[in-house]
Image (tube, helix red, strand yellow):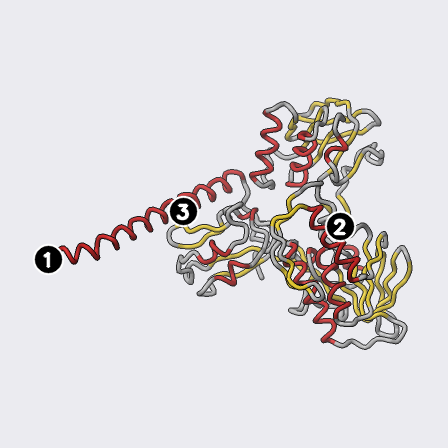
């Protein structure tokens, strides 16, 4: 009898532990199933960037990848369903790659694009070099839009350039960096640390696409290591705070970044260097690093009146539209963020026009912001609509075969961008479209 009691003393706690484990497991699985169902119902099934593909034959269901994802708990990107890991919120995945590192069985492959939606990127070697020797690519153009990954790639690309030891001439630079976004910024710091003769040419402002984010936008960053700076440990921070941090480093390190310099051409010289033609002058260098964005030239509407000063292609400060009648055009995250932000900032009459039937490409949080603004009467949403004409004080939209005119003071077009394929083709850089491949 005493042995039975001793047996129960050991077994009952184990049973209680197992019961708690299975209850938690079932609760997490139910949450993952709900997230996957929500993504499919909303049509949010195509990842926008680098993302994991999980081999179920190798997956142990240990959950290491789920725990490692830096987007948790703000976004439920990965989950366990049926004892296997799955990408349950594809559009929330922004390519950290931490899941692959954490997987103990190498069951995860990081890929670009999918069978339905391809991603066009330059053909690169593992050292970030294109098919044109001496021309390199890092950051968003190469598919790495995440700030931490772009910073890392900018550093690694310059380290590869230094190691390649391409010969130059006494009057030529070692490197011209095109773009001062995260990758270009990291490249400048690394070039200075390695003693390279370099210059960074930026057509706009420090930060690249980060600078173009709406005011107050929260930017998720991960720790990144940079020469002369050490480890950047910023996590959740605003656009303004991140840019101030970078500007402080720029001043402290006296980085050679030249603004309002748009590169219009790159040619190889007879001396086997590159002649980089920019609006501010011509630069000769042994190597060129393209750290430009994928957005390229903003996609325009192609309607009369689009050249009026009131038409812009990105939102900087929502409060500048307070009290104005504003039209936002587009159906992606940028358009929804712009429309909701302007409505929340006190736009007198805000209209969101999208040619599609639903906001299938936008993240749930942005769709909810728009829905809430619409419910409160601060925003009017017009699906299946197109802009037909723009005048100084009005805009004409077509919806369901009928045209209607709205009084209008400002128009924000967020219809995506045209990739710089013509520029890449002109300088001989080959590109490829990846459909779910590494």
As measured in the structure, the alpha-carbon distance from the residue carrying label 1 to the one carrying label 2 is: 78 Å
Q: Secondary structure at mark 2?
A: loop
Q: Residue at x 8, y 56 (%)?
A: 1
Q: Which residue is mark 1?
A: 2
* Label 3 CA crowd tier, 10 Å (few <14, some 14–19, many 20+): some
Q: Residue at x 65, y 62 (%)?
A: 152
Residue 409 point in image, percent of width and height: 79, 27
Q: Secondary structure at mark 3?
A: helix
As measured in the structure, the alpha-carbon distance from the residue carrying label 1 to the one carrying label 3 is: 40 Å
Quadrant of the image containing the C terminus: bottom right
Residue 345 point in image, percent of width and height: 70, 30
Q: Secondary structure at mark 1?
A: helix
Residue 109 point in image, percent of width and height: 52, 61
Q: Which of disc 2 and disc 1 is earlier in sequence? A: 1
Compared to residue 420, the image places residue 430 above or below, namely below
Which quarter of the picture shows residue 155? Answer: bottom right
Q: Which of disc 3 and disc 2 is earlier in sequence? A: 3
- In the picture, the disc for residue 296 is 2
**Is residue 269 among the parts visible in the rendering?**
yes
Viewed as shown, does residue 53 lie left or right of 82?
A: right
Q: Which residue is mark 3?
A: 28
Compared to residue 424, the image places residue 170 above or below, namely below
- Between circles 2 and 3, the one closer to the viewer is 3
Asked if the residue under mark 2 is in contact with the one under mark 1, i.e. CB atoms within 8 Å, the reply is: no
Q: Residue at x 74, y 37 (%)?
A: 317
């Amino acid at each position: 009898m005493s042995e039975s009691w001793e047996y129960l003393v050991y077994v009952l706690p184990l049973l209680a532990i197992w019961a708690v484990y299975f209850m938690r497991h079932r609760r997490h699985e139910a949450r993952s199933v709900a997230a996957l169902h929500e993504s499919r119902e909303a049509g949010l099934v195509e990842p926008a960037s680098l993302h994991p593909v999980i081999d179920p034959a190798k997956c142990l269901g240990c959950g290491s990848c789920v725990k490692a994802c830096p987007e948790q708990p703000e976004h439920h990107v990965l989950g366990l369903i049926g004892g296997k890991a799955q990408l349950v919120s594809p559009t929330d995945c922004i390519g950290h790659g931490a899941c692959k590192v954490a997987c103990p069985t190498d069951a995860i492959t990081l890929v670009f694009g999918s069978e339905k939606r391809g991603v066009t990127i330059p053909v690169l070697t593992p050292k970030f070099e294109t098919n044109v020797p001496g021309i390199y690519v890092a950051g968003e153009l190469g598919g790495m839009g995440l700030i931490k990954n772009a910073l890392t790639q900018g550093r690694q690309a310059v380290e590869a350039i230094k190691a390649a030891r391409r010969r130059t001439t006494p009057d030529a630079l070692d490197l011209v960096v095109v773009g001062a976004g995260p990758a270009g910024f990291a490249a400048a710091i690394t070039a200075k640390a390695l003693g390279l003769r370099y210059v960074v040419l930026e057509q706009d402002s420090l930060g690249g696409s980060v600078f173009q984010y709406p005011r107050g936008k929260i930017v998720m960053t991960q720790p990144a290591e940079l020469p002369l700076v050490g480890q950047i440990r910023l996590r959740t921070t605003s656009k303004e705070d991140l840019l101030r941090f970078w500007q402080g480093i720029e001043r402290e390190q006296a980085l050679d970044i030249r603004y309002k310099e748009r590169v219009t051409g790159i040619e190889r010289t007879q001396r086997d260097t590159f002649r980089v033609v920019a609006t501010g002058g011509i630069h000769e260098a042994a190597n060129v690093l393209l750290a430009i964005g994928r957005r390229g030239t903003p996609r325009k509407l192609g309607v009369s009146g689009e050249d009026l000063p009131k038409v812009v292609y990105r939102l900087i400060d929502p409060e500048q539209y307070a009290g104005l009648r504003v039209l936002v055009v587009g159906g992606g995250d940028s358009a929804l963020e712009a429309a909701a932000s302007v409505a929340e900032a006190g736009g007198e009459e805000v209209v969101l026009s999208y040619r599609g039937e639903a906001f299938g490409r936008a993240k749930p949080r942005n769709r909810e912001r728009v829905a809430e603004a619409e419910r409160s009467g601060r925003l009017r949403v017009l699906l299946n609509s197109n802009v037909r004409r723009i005048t100084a004080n009005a805009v004409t939209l077509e919806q369901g075969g009928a045209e209607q005119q709205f009084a209008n003071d400002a128009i924000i077009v967020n219809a995506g961008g045209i990739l710089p394929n013509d520029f890449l083709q002109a300088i001989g850089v080959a590109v490829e479209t990846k459909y779910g491949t590494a």
